[in-house]
Image: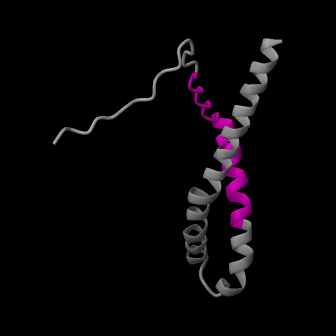
Amino acid sequence: MPAPTTSAAPATPGVAATAVPAAPAPAPTVHHRALYTWLAVYPTITLASVLTAPHTTHLPVYLRTGLLVTLVVPVVVYGLMPALLKGHTAAAGRRAARRTRLARR
């Protein structure tokens, strides 16, 4: 039995591949990361504190704090920070594209 052959699509003559991969967006600066962390942590702690306060007033402060940290850290680390950093990456890409368009003029 003959071996199966694969056929590649013929290349279009005179057309060169010109696609250049886009450069990755720069990482946010330390100041941006601090701002994003504050934007994620402060409202989350405030909301969690307000929602849990009626149920935790009888607990000592260290247990209330431990409960808040247990609730807030995963929400911030796995939910809010990736979303904020994704927004940063999108905004950085838009800024880079705008600078490129303006430089071509």
Q: What span is colored magenta in the figure?
A: 19-45
Colour mapping used in the image: one colour
- Out of 31 and 88, give the one closest to the viewer: 88
Residue 14 locus on image (x, y percent): 56, 11
86 to 14, vertically: above or below: below
Residue 61 locus on image (x, y percent): 61, 76
What residue is at 79 percent from the left and 20 percent from the top? 101
- Out of 18 and 2, give the one closest to the viewer: 2
Q: State the residue lying farthest toward the front.
A: 1
Q: Is residue 99 left or right of residue 80?
A: right
What residue is at 59 percent from the left and 70 percent from the top? 71
Residue 87 locus on image (x, y percent): 70, 45
What residue is at 71 percent from the left and 44 percent from the top? 35
13 to 42, vertically: above or below: above
> How many numbered discs sit on the rendered protein?
0
Question: Residue 32 magenta-drawn?
Answer: yes
Question: Residue 46 magenta-drawn?
Answer: no
Q: Quadrant of the C terminus?
A: top right
Residue 77 locus on image (x, y percent): 57, 57
Q: Quadrant of residue 19?
A: top right
54 to 77, vertically: above or below: below
Q: State the residue lying farthest toward the left.
A: 1
Q: Is residue 55 left or right of residue 98?
A: left
Q: Quadrant of the N terminus?
A: top left
What residue is at 64 percent from the left and 88 percent from the top? 58
